[in-house]
Amino acid sequence: MVGHLRICIRNAYDGTPQVFYPVVVIGAGPSGIATACRLKQKCGFDQFRIFDRQDGIGGTWWANRYPGVVSRRSQDILPTVFYSFSFAPNYHSRTIFPTGREYVEYLHSVAERAELIDKIQLNTEVISMEWIEQDAEWELWICHRNPERETGTTEEQSTSHHGKREEVIRAKVVISAVGILSKPNEWPADVPNRDAFDGQILHSSQWPVESDLDEKDIVLVGSACSAAQIAPALLRSNIKSLTHIIRTPPWFVPRMEEPGGEAAYAKWAPWIYSTIPGLGFLREHVRLRQQAEASCLAHMRALAPAKYHAMLTPTYSLGSRRRIFDNNWLKSMSDPRYTLTNRSLLSVQGTEVTVGSKEPNPPEEPDVYHADVLILATGFNATPFLQSVAVHGRQGLSMHGIWATRGGAHAYMGTAMDGFPNFFMIMGPNTFVGHTSAIMSIENNIDYVLRLIQPVLRGDVESLEPKATAVQSWLHDIRRDMKDTLFEGCPSWYNGNGAYNSVMYPLSNAFTTVPIVWITRQ
């Protein structure tokens, strides 16, 4: 086992006990589970604790339970084999696209096989952390949540700790596996009087365990991956009507069907993937963007009603926003209960939703729709990073404050910041890929972090952090390379609707994989 550090309770006899963890991992989603697995597998180290504020493991896949994410046709994510870890490949899925439930079950199986379950502490939120210079340790304030007593929006829950038990702990190393899809855009900022709506308001990431939508008039807001799954799923149920408000049309990519059909795939795919080496890692053939756009438009026009073609034609390049794998949303638009509009949401009152133009000239008459339920599939505020945790490093400096003065979130290799020793991020700023699996990025980050922290765990050094010049040089290169990508081409959640892009990595994952492999083998 690497290291001399052990989990212990300090000052137990003095009445002020404090638990010390050599390593704390924040988050029990894919990044957190993978980090813990590799700590045990590559470092032989098990003196760590994983904290997650939710009541189950899975991260965003645990939180998102909207209609469609639990159906057989859910396909916001990549084929199963591309969305599993290299050290724990998922060759046994019976469909090419896993559902939300299937993916959470996969993460559970990985955690169970790695004997991590007793290392995970759920319903526990890390509120803030501060570097204690004289001890070369992090002091963390954690809050033990009571989900049964919590009501209100995510914002209200995260800012109120009334009735919850708080605790202060210490850690030598802190690894953040906090995802960016954790703080939903709970209400459109330009729409007044949320409280004036008398119906039920649901957000795709806060779906109740039980919801009765039968014979209800429903208004759905959003056009990204969640909305693309929710709309056809609702139309397969017994709703009365669905009015769908979109602002920006997505690019629709034809769904990849199971080779040989669903029954044959379910029978043979597990054996094929587990028997033929390397098959799960073949790359897709890349076509010219213009040809791909023409193909996508032809697909849309062949399936969607003609009256919606103009609304569904993107005015931006394929690739600059998240594309949609068509899961029968286009076909479902022919359902007589479905209405699509690209007019802006203006206001709500009682059980009515008003849409229309926000431009005064020329004046247009608004449309009013009845709504028993308003569903917001309006995405997340993704660009700030570490939104739920206040991080204070050397001399009490705030990480969010430094990011604000420098223009936005950033970190060396997307992982570490100057002035914040022994603190590392998995899937930190500028590490995300736009249209392929994030798993390679996650594993690259983890391999790099584990290489860095081993001297700390062994006791060879007290702390480590990147030089400020290295951070600035990395940031300069990221900003330079980003200018040549489609990600700068239009406003999106990648760049805070047109601001600083702190999410996407502008190059291929190979540009980080190769140096990380070299570093980790030295």
Image (cartoon, rainbow, N blue to C red):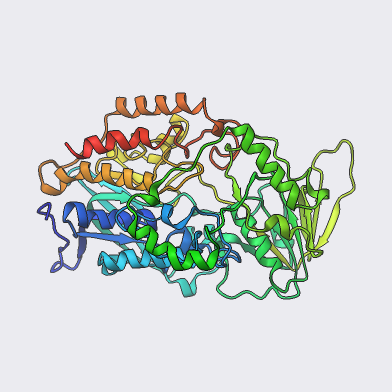
| Residue at x 34%, y 67% (from the top left corner) | 109
Q: Can residue 277 be seen in this view?
A: yes
Q: In this view, does 171 lie above or below 9?
A: above
Q: Quadrant of residue 323?
A: top right
Q: In which quarter of the image is residue 20?
A: bottom left
User: Where does residue 81 sit, x and y in percent of width and height?
Assistant: 42, 55
Image mark count: 0
Q: From the viewer's perspective, is 114 left or right of 410?
A: left
Q: In this view, does 57 lie above or below 463?
A: below
For this rendering, which residue is in front, 94 or 202?
A: 94
For this rendering, which residue is in front, 439 or 21?
A: 439
For this rendering, which residue is in front, 131 or 91?
A: 91
Q: In this view, does 401 lie above or below 243?
A: above
Q: From the viewer's perspective, is 113 left or right of 296?
A: left
User: Where does residue 451 sit, x and y in percent of width and height?
Assistant: 21, 42
Quadrant location of the C terminus in the rendered image: top left
User: Where does residue 289 sit, x and y in percent of width and height?
Assistant: 59, 33
User: Where does residue 127 sit, x and y in percent of width and height?
Assistant: 38, 55
Q: In which quarter of the image is residue 187?
A: bottom right
Quadrant location of the N terminus in the rendered image: bottom left
| Residue at x 27%, y 41% (from the top left corner) | 448
Q: Is residue 317 visible?
A: no
